[in-house]
Amino acid sequence: MIIERDVGITMDDGLVLRADVFRPEGDAKAPVVMAMGPYGKGLPFQAGYAPEWKRVVEEHPDVLKHSSCSYVTWETVDPERWVPFGYAVVHVDSRGMGRSPGYLNMFSARETQDYFECIEWAGTRPWTSGKVGLCGISYYAINQWMVAALQPSHLAAIIPWEGASDFYREESYHGGIFSNVFKEFWYPLRILDRQHGKGSRGWKDPWLNDWVAGPETLTESELEANRVDYVNELRRHSLEDGFFHSRTPDLGRVMVPLLSAANWGGLGLHARGNFEGFVLAGSSQKWLEVHVGMHEELFYSEYGLDLQKRFFDHFLKGADNGWDREPRVALTVRYVDHFEQRKENEWPLARTNWTRIYLGAQGQTLTWGPPERPGKLAFEAEGDGLTFASAPLQEKTEITGPMAARLYVSSSTEDADLFLTFRAFGPGGNEVDFRGAMDSHTPLSQGWLRASHRKIDAARSRAYRPYHTHDEVRKLNPSMVYELNVELWPTCVVLPAGHHLALTVQGRDFERKESKEKWKGSGPFLHNDPFNRPKDVFNGTTEIYTGANEVSCLLLPLIPK
């Protein structure tokens, strides 16, 4: 293949971004598979992410088929597995990152406009067919939704794989609570480490024999002056204001064919946005695929590659390969001891039997009918919270879809944070959990809500997915009872008879204290920022009310046999 490094792409303001281009030899014009992002087009996967690479090749040795893996970079496609099939691959360093100079302002309108112009540039090269597809994981998925909403003329299809599509609700504030821990380790390790100008203090690009984030080497003060103070900027914008609006796409304007690939275990970042993107996108040609496993591994597997190629072959090459006749939804259904593939036609599933299960204070129960007697239970915000459990299931039960809880609560302070964890247990008491995107033992689902953010947008809400405006703070009157509607992220599990359901309600992040793993059930998506959660407000006592007048319940998506 022909390889061109550090190709310049001039933006409308005169700044030149840098791209690596991999394309077939010969005169045939090729469609383009593109990704633009911050992680450094010149940093090999094996060097920058050695533990992740080791795990991928050990668990999915098929990634080594038909490739020397000499050109693989983090969360983007392997050129050696695409170019021989008639595609060109273009990887672009985003503004202010890697080899591209400029002011670093992640997910900004400027960055999205840059992506728009890179797509139009790629679509007009003499070696291209004029069709551009976008494909990548996480950051490289998030910005696909954003640029697709701008509708570049040469954009033909997108594959956002385990990303997000709502900058406030998925990436930054869960239910109005700042998700700080992931940002605080991701930003310095994955972003500041690759900022353009890091130069000789950063990684070496083995292909250019130059610096990944160079060529110039700037002082730390110069680097700081050339970027937005990202994490502190997030802290300053605790409500959904213009800062977030400019970084959240209008999904209704996403009109190109799309394949949205979600992970059931992507709680905290890599799940909700793929479901919401699929449902809300304006495109009439859209598909949803939901898989299991760790964050990046399935993307590079033979399964992932075949899926991506079939989709792009159809929409970028015009291949009559039957993709247009594929059912719109492909689910990996989770059983307690295995997985099964199943095709569906919509999301949520049309045959869903939406069923409420009710919290009961007496005995901390979950019952299929509301409790007759009123009751209440209290928990300390920093304690272990309360777990409500059902009787053993009488028959095999499938739960697949989004969920929502309605809780009646009071607080000893002017606010309260609720952390909900949906769980299941076998007859012997063993919890049903799965390997998640970033946690080895992920529960079935989680949801979050700050009580003062309880305001609902009725027009955008659904019974199974409340939509909070997050545009004002409504403080609590201590000891007064309030109705709170909490969104729980989509789940899928088939439980045998004899298992029972459980809902854990806490005032802090869920964790299994006995776990020896690095992450203990909530992955890195933790919420312990003292600026956002001052102890005098969020370390109080919360009470949950149950009974005929305060009908606290959980809405479950039960799927008939």
Image (spheres, rainbow, N blue to C red):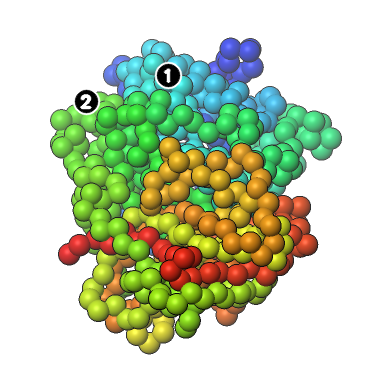
Residue 364 sits above or below residue 65 on the image: below
Q: Position of residue 333 (x, y in %)?
A: 28, 60
Q: Position of residue 319 (x, y in %)?
A: 19, 29
**Dividing the picture into quarters, in which one does residue 258 lie?**
top left
Identify residue type, mark 2: Gly
Residue drawn where x is 76% and y is 52% of the image: 531
Residue 408 sits above or below residue 193 on the image: below
Q: Mark 1 or mark 2, which has the lower sequence index?
A: 1
Residue drawn where x is 43% and y is 37% of the image: 459
Query: Is label 2 in a helix, a strand or a loop?
Result: loop
Please name whichever residue, 64 or 90, is drawn nearer the observer in this view of the structure: 90
Label 1 packing within 10 angstroms: few (<14), some (14-19), many (20+): some
Identify residue type, mark 1: Pro
Q: How many numbered circles does the render carry?
A: 2
Q: Quadrant of the C terminus?
A: bottom left
Judging by the rendered image, the residue that carries numbered circle 2 is 318
Residue drawn where x is 66% and y is 65% of the image: 479
Please name whichever residue, 412 or 299, is drawn nearer the observer in this view of the structure: 412
Residue 317 sits above or below residue 236 on the image: above
Q: Position of residue 216 (x, y in %)?
A: 74, 29
Tell me if 12 is positioned left or right of 424 in this view: right
Judging by the rendered image, the residue that carries numbered circle 1 is 152
**Dividing the picture into quarters, in which one does residue 181 lie?**
bottom right
